[in-house]
Image: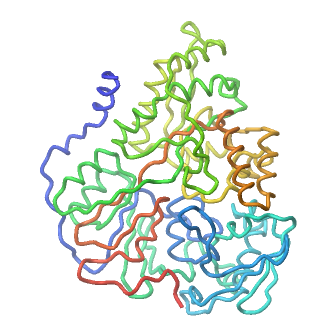
Amino acid sequence: MVRRRGFLAASLALPWLGGCAPAPARRRDDVLRFGLAGPVRNLDPRLATDATSARVNRLLYVPLVDFDAASRPVPVLATWEQRDATRYRFTLGHGGRRFADGQRLTAADVAATYRSVLDPATASPHRATLSLIDAVEVLDADRLEFRLQAPDPLFPAYLGVGILPAGLIESGQGFQRVPVGSGTFRLLDWPEPGRLLLERRRDRQRFELVTVKDPNVRVMKLLRGEIDLLQNDLAPELVAFLRRRRGIRMERIDGVNFSYLGFNLEDPATGDPRVRRAVAHGIDREAVLRYLFRGGGRTAEAMFPPEHWAGAPELRGHLYDPAASRALLADAGWSGERRLVLSYKTSSDPFRLRLATVIQSQLAAVGIDLRIQSYDWGTFFGDIKAGRFQLYGLTWVGIRTPDIFRYVFHSAALPPAGANRGRYRSAVVDALIEQAQQAPDPARRAALYRQLQARLHADLPYVPLWYEDQFYAARDDIVGYHLAADGNYDGLDQVHVHGAEPSPSSRLIQ
């Protein structure tokens, strides 16, 4: 343990942390600047797949439903009633009914949005989940019905796509760069990649979203007053450094985004369950969280945290057990004379690279040699989607509904039909997914999802790692920002400069 601590501590040194950085500079204008680690890529909620774009789209658009703290669906634009096993009627409320261009949002806009998602020509990643919709019928300006091909008690939870104007959909507008939604923000300008100017509609407060990829530079920009607020995507030593700085406000909460190692099950080595179990027993997750993350996370055993309505709190972890790891490798035919060599793909983010080297060191001790391959995000994620990997590390962000299991683990969800990128196939898992989706009783449905997660925990198409904490850092005169467990940016709705109180809270523009 002493050697491990020394290795991790050595990896945390940054030369400028010992200096005496000044307190943050004061504001220069009335624009609040939010520092991002990665750029916004797509402002069309039907098409966006990266986390940053999805989080900004939540500010620009309003969906029919959202989720409560236990990830159960709750009304936003509309309430609903189930008319029969395959028919749901939605009634629009009063809030969120005004698009940024002044048009009133009606049921026709909702229908047009979902019809476009279902159109293969749109190439929406939501189409697979929503393909159970047989028809969308507009009843009047405020009401519409969805008819399903088969019963699905989870259906309302799938309707989280932001609503777009029907007329602009029909005209072929490119929402990717010219968004028009009914959210509390609107886009003012996108002058260059990595820089967006948004306006909060109720009080005209402007926000500039600035991409600063280097975390050290992002911190220095905060201290120099060039940005006012940042969230996540900092190495733990930078978080600790900011916590000690005069003039900086910080907050931290438990997160729910699921980090994991993914395997290619069609590969001769990683397709062997003994090898996957050896990897699981060879990683000391508690040590990584304690020393590398500095306590900024909690171990995970499943995609959903225990507090989720479909969570599986009874799952027991694959404990760090080097002896068991070596025995599994030996049983699989790997030994000191024939060491197992695996390719591990990750992004070029400095902290993710450091994490990869820690995992590399831990697995080397049990007889697995990792060859780390790091790439820019686009290349890395392209390889993962194409199945060009043996082993990789990633995080599922913002997952709320159990349809994720079909999307990620069902045998029919191999790309491009879904995100079963590791080519996992299990008749038992397929059956559990289908039974759970059809179970009308909520308690029975939750029990089936717990069985499903127990089977995945045993088969290990993923090695569960942890849920990383969420945090933000801001100048101390920036107040009102509230963190979300999934890292969304909804807190921008209420953030303001001390002494300049915002208008009353409202996620919905009338």
At 74% from the left and 80% from the top, the residue drawn is 112
Residue 132 locus on image (x, y percent): 81, 65
Of 157 and 375, the residue lying toward us: 157
- Say above or below: 25 vs 424: below
- The residue positioned 42% from the left and 38% from the top of the image is 353
Taking 508 as reference, is 396 above or below it?
above
Residue 98 screen position, x and y as percent:
57, 89
- In front of the other: 43 or 315: 315
Q: Nearer the viewer, residue 404 or 167?
A: 404
> 53 and 457: which one is in front?
457
Left or right, residue 64 beside residue 492: right
Q: Quarter of the image for the N terminus: give it.
A: top left
Query: Image height check: is 435 above or below 152?
Result: above
Q: Position of residue 457 (x, y in %)?
A: 64, 37
The image quadrant of residue 317 is: top right
Q: Report the number of numbered marks.
A: 0
Residue 123 occupies quadrant:
bottom right
* Quadrant of image for the C terminus: bottom right
x then y, percent, for residue 331: 65, 13
**Residue at x 15% of width, y 54% of height:** 21
